[in-house]
Amino acid sequence: MHDPALAQEALSELPPDIAQSPLFNGDLAPIPKARRNWSTYNFAALWISMAHCIPTYMLAGGLIAVGMNWWQALLTIGLGNVIVLVPILLNAHPGTKYGIPFPVFARASFGTTGANVAAVLRAFVACGWFGIQTFIGGEAAKTLIEALWPSYGHIAEGVTVLGLSIPSAFTFLLFWGLNIFIIYKGMNAVRVFENWAAPLVLVMAAVLLGWAVKTAGGLGPMLEQPSRFATVGEFWKVFIPSLTGMIGFWATLSLNIPDFTRFGKGQKEQMLGQTLGLPTTMIAFSAMGVIITSATQAILHGVDVGKLWDPMFLLGQLTSSANAIGRDAPLIASSGTRALVAIISLFGVAVATLSCNIAANVVSPANDFANLAPRYISFKTGGLITGLVGIAMMPWKLLASAESYIFNWLVGYSALLGPIAGIMIADYWLLRRRELDVAELYRPNGRYAGTNWVAVGALALGVLPNLPGFLKSVHVVGGEPGFFDSLYVYAWFTGFIVAGAAYLIGMRLAPRPQTQTPPSPTVS
C-alpha cells in the first residue's frame, strides 16, 4: 500500500515536523483530498462483495439449525444488520472528514500509545476471521478439485497437519497465498477487485438458485417448516443471542470502517453506498441460501439438512460423476459440463472468498499492526502478520458447530468490540463534537499523547459484565445458569452502553491534561 507520492501529498497538508514523527508513515497518513475518489458505487460494491461470501450464505442455516423457521432467521439477520449499520456510519464519518484510518482515529480517544490496545484487539479478531475465510475457501477448492481429480482427496490419506488432511492443508495454504498476493498490490487493487467481484458473485448465486428451483420443481419443503418454538419466551431465548451474533458478524467493520471511508469523496457517498450495500445484500444473499437449501431438500432425498446448508457440499454433488445421494444418476449427465461447472464454481468461490477476506479481514489488521511501530511495520508487513496469526488460530476449530460459531465466536468477540465502539463514538460525537486536530494525532508529545487510562478503564468495565457468561459459554467454568449468563446474550449492547457511559463520565470527572503544543488547523 505504501505510496511515496501519496505520503508526500499528505505531508504537504500537515505541519513540517510530522514527517519525522515516529507515529507517522505513508500507510497511516491522512489521505489527501485529491486522492479521495471512492464513489457511492465503490462503497456499495465493497459491502456487496464482502457480504457475498459463504459465511453469509450459511448464516440463516445456523439460525434454522437452532430452531427458527425461515422468516424468523431472515428477520434476525436483517434486524441485526440494520442495528450494526448505525455504529458503522457513526465511525465512518471521521474517516471521510479527516482521511485517517482506524488506528489513527483511535488515538483521539485512547491516546497515541493506548490506541494500540484497541487496534490489537480488533486485529486479533480479524486474524480469526481471516483464518475462517481462508479455510472455507481452501475447503471449497478441495471439493471442486476432487470433482476434476477424484483421487486428490486421498493423497497422503491418514496424515494430518494440525488436524488438517494434506489435501486440505494444501488448498488452505493456496488460498492464504492468494490473499497475501492481492493485498501486496495495495488499496487501489482492492477497490478494483471489489468493483468487478460484487456483481459476478451475485450472478453465479442466482444461476445456482435458478437451477435448484427448476430441478426441484418448486421452492422445496423448508419454506413450510414451522418454528420449533412454542412460545414467545422460548423464541426470545434464542433470538437475542442470535441477534447479538448477527451484530457481531460485522462488529469488526463497525470499528475499522474509517480504513475505507478515508478514501470517500464525501459523507453522502459513503453513507448512501453503505446503506444500500449492507442490509439489503445480507438479507438477499441469506434468502438465496434459504431457497437453494430448501429446493435441494427436494432434489437430494435423505440428506441431513445440516449438510445442505454447506454450498460446497451441494457443488460437490453437482460436479460428481457418481450418482447423487437419493437419486439413480449424477445431477449433471455430461462429464464435460460437470468439468465446466466445477471450474466456474471454483472461480466464483475463489472470488467470493478473496473479495470478502481481503476487504474485511486484512486491510484493518494490516493498519493495526503497522500502528504498533509505524517506522518499522508497513501495511504489507502487517498483512503478512495477519496471515501468520490466522494460521496459528486454527480456524477449523472455530467452525466445529453452529453453536460454537454463533454463541462462542460471534457473541464472544462482540463482547470485546462493543465497548471499543461505544468509547470511540462517545468520544467523537459527544465529547469532541466531531472536531479533531489531525496533526496532533501524529505527535508523540501532543494533546493526544500517551495512554488515556479513562478509555482503558471504560473498556475493562464494558468487558467485565460479559466475562462470566463467556467463560461459562466456552466451558471454562461450570454451574447453574444465573444473571450473568442472561446478560451475556446481550454482550455487544451491554459492552457498548457500559463502556460509552463510563468513558463520558470518566472524562468529565478527570479530563486529560492538554499540552501546550499549538493546535493545528483541522481538516474540514
Image (cartoon, helix red, strand yellow):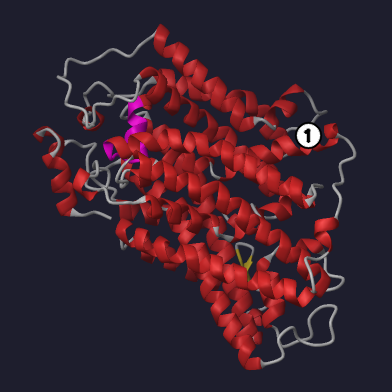
In terms of secondary structure, what is the magenta stretch mainly? helix
- Quick check: can you spot residue 478? yes
Q: In which quarter of the image is the C terminus?
A: top left
> Residue shown at 13%/47% (left/top)?
8
The residue range painted magenta reads 98-108
Q: Quadrant of the N terminus?
A: bottom left
Residue 434 figure quarter: top left
Residue 63 % position (x, y): 74, 49
Residue 226 % position (x, y): 86, 50
Name which residue type carries label 1: Trp
- Quick check: can you spot residue 461? no
- Residue 179 within the segment the image draws in magenta: no
Residue 266 figure quarter: top left
Residue 152 as seen in the image, left or right of residue 26: right
In front of the other: 69 or 28: 69
> Residue shown at 57%/50% (left/top)?
280
Residue 53 % position (x, y): 56, 60
Q: How many marks?
A: 1
> Residue shown at 67%/92% (left/top)?
334
Q: Is residue 496 above or below residue 4?
A: above
Residue 167 % position (x, y): 59, 75
Q: Residues within 10 Å of mark 1 (few under 14, many from 20)?
A: few
**Residue located farthest toward the left when viewing the structure as drawn:** 16
Residue 346 as seen in the image, left or right of residue 485: left
In front of the other: 136 or 211: 211
**Residue located farthest toward the top when viewing the structure as drawn:** 509
Residue 192 figure quarter: bottom left
Provide the residue designation for mark 1. 236
Residue 372 as seen in the image, left or right of residue 290: left
Q: Is mark 1 on a helix, strand or loop?
A: helix
